[in-house]
Image (spheres, rainbow, N blue to C red):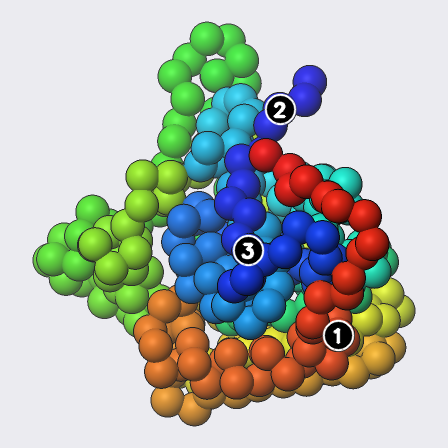
Amino acid sequence: MAWDIAALVLYPPGFDKSKQYPTIVSVHPFGSCKEQTSGAVYGKALAEQGYVVIAYDASYQGESGGSPRWIEDPTQRVEDISHVIDFAVTLPYVDADRIGVIGVCGGGGYVLNATLTEKRIKAVVGITPVNLGRLFREGFSNFDPIGALNAMAAQRTAEARGGELQVNELLPASPEVAKANGLTERDVFEATDYYKTPRGQQPGGATRMLFSHAQNTLGWDAFGFAELLMTQPMMVVVGQKVGAFGAYRDGLEIYGRSTASADRQLVELQDWSHYDLYDKPEPVGLAMERIVPFFEQYLEAGASVRSEALEPAE
């Protein structure tokens, strides 16, 4: 069964349909959507720098298709990236030889994983990247991955027999609720402040997960075979204020393991945390100071003119 993937295509200033542009696919975090940090922050900033940017909703999430809803399947999330590239290379104003990817949080883990095998990607940036497989095996399963898998198996059987779906809400309803329940660990509280307030809240950003269909996540590793397969230029941006979701740890791991990369770069921001890098102007600005020249070097920013008249896709 096939379904549509919903996307925002962001154009650079002075967009000219007769030219070809370097293009960046922007991938949202776990529990997020295209209207949040992947599109409204990094996508917008990169479009302003001369790129066509495609920010999309993952399968089963946001405005994209797929049923049942709120499945977080890393294999599908990575496959989505290739499907979006399939779409991009059909657009006459996209230069198929100058495609990069950027992802935030779980999306950062997904773009790094996709780059291992998707060689149409010429450069990759992971913003505070999280290896969702590692996080699910550890904190998200209370360090009991086998117990979690057994519970998922039982719930999936119950649902197959007609029982109600178990959809887990991932965050407290508000920062106030988080404080009242002692949920003040940095990443949990700052995630709540982003996703559950006007700061970042969006209709498509449902911080939910269908529990019974999460088995694949526990058996997945974003960084498997990185030493052999990460050949493209790669950059990871992490904040040194660490939290329970482990982006700092994961960022350093993939940087250390990407020994075959044509150019690996690690950007550490001393005074900033995981969720600061979602949307706060100063840390995002510091990140962009490194991201822009990185993509310029490897995607050769600046449109090349084509002779024939071209019509942009709807």
Q: Give yes or no for contact between labels 2 and 3 (Cβ–Cβ under 8 Å).
A: no
Which percent across, then down, holds residue 304?
77, 65
Q: Residue at x 80, y 56 (%)?
A: 306
Count of residue discs: 3
Residue 11 bears which disc, if any? 3
Q: Nearer the viewer, residue 210 or 102?
A: 102
Residue designated by label 1: 300
| SS of the residue under disc 2 | loop
Q: CA distance from mark 3 to mark 1?
A: 17 Å
Residue designated by label 2: 3
Q: Nearer the viewer, mark 1 or mark 2?
A: 1
Q: Residue at x 63, y 70 (%)?
A: 125
Q: Looking at the image, is 112 positioned above or below residue 8?
A: below
Label 3 crowd (10 A; few <14 / some 14-19 / many >=20):
many
Does 200 sit left or right of 121 as displayed? left
Which percent across, then down, holds residue 229?
86, 65
Which percent across, then down, holds residue 52?
61, 57
The disc, 2 or 3, on the residue closer to the chain's N-terminal end is 2
